Image (tube, helix red, strand yellow):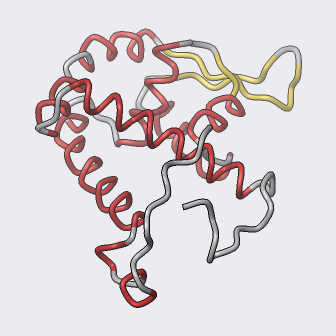
Amino acid sequence: MAKPATTALPDADALLQLDNQFCFALYSASLAMTKTYKPFLESLGLTYPQYLVMLILWQQDNVLVKEIGERLFLDSGTLTPLLKRLEAAGLIERTRDPEDERQVRITLTKTGRALKRKAHGVPLQVLCASGQSPETLMQLRAQLSDVREELIRYGNGEDAPIDAVDCGT
């Protein structure tokens, strides 16, 4: 992906101001988003992380825990308790993969599949709450996906260490 056009950086002190932090804007927006979802998901009996798992399963049922973890960027230590709660709620079943007993498959129950119909209105409710157009949110989602991919690449050591003075900005 091409680097954005060069922009002058603020001075060193301004760089350390909370309101100038991209990470804080992203973090606080994430908190606001999760808070916005809460009442809509409570009516479904789901937490936000559980909703994300259900979105994956509604898109493709009968997937490995490993695949869910990869899609959500979660490790099995975080994902397993979440899946156990969904199973206790009767929304999913966890079974050993017959081809590889070390792997666990997740499938929706009849109740889990039926919950999808009740969830159809959630994205529209959140869109309305955002006060943004669908086009604006899709553009923002694409930009954030690009940022995430670059950060993952950097975290995996795929790029040389960044020189703070000349990082391509």
| Position of the C terminus by quadrant | bottom right
In this orientation, which residue lies closer to the viewer: 32 or 79? 32
Query: Residue at left 44%, top 24%?
Result: 55
**29 above or below 19?**
above
Q: In which quarter of the image is residue 67?
A: top right
Q: In which quarter of the image is residue 101?
A: top right
In this orientation, which residue lies closer to the viewer: 124 or 111? 124
Query: Residue at left 80%, top 57%?
Result: 157
In this orientation, which residue lies closer to the viewer: 19 or 65? 19
**54 above or below 114?**
below
Q: Count the labels in the image.
A: 0
Furthest toward the bottom, the residue is 13
Q: In which quarter of the image is residue 112?
A: top left
| Position of the N terminus by quadrant | top right
Q: Where is residue 77 in the image (x, y as percent from the top left)?
A: 66, 52
Q: Say left or right for 63 vs 112.
A: right
In this orientation, which residue lies closer to the viewer: 59 or 146? 146
Q: Position of residue 127 (x, y in %)?
A: 19, 30
Query: Residue at left 43%, top 42%?
Result: 49
Q: Where is residue 73 in the image (x, y as percent from the top left)?
A: 61, 44
Q: Where is residue 61 in the image (x, y as percent from the top left)?
A: 57, 12
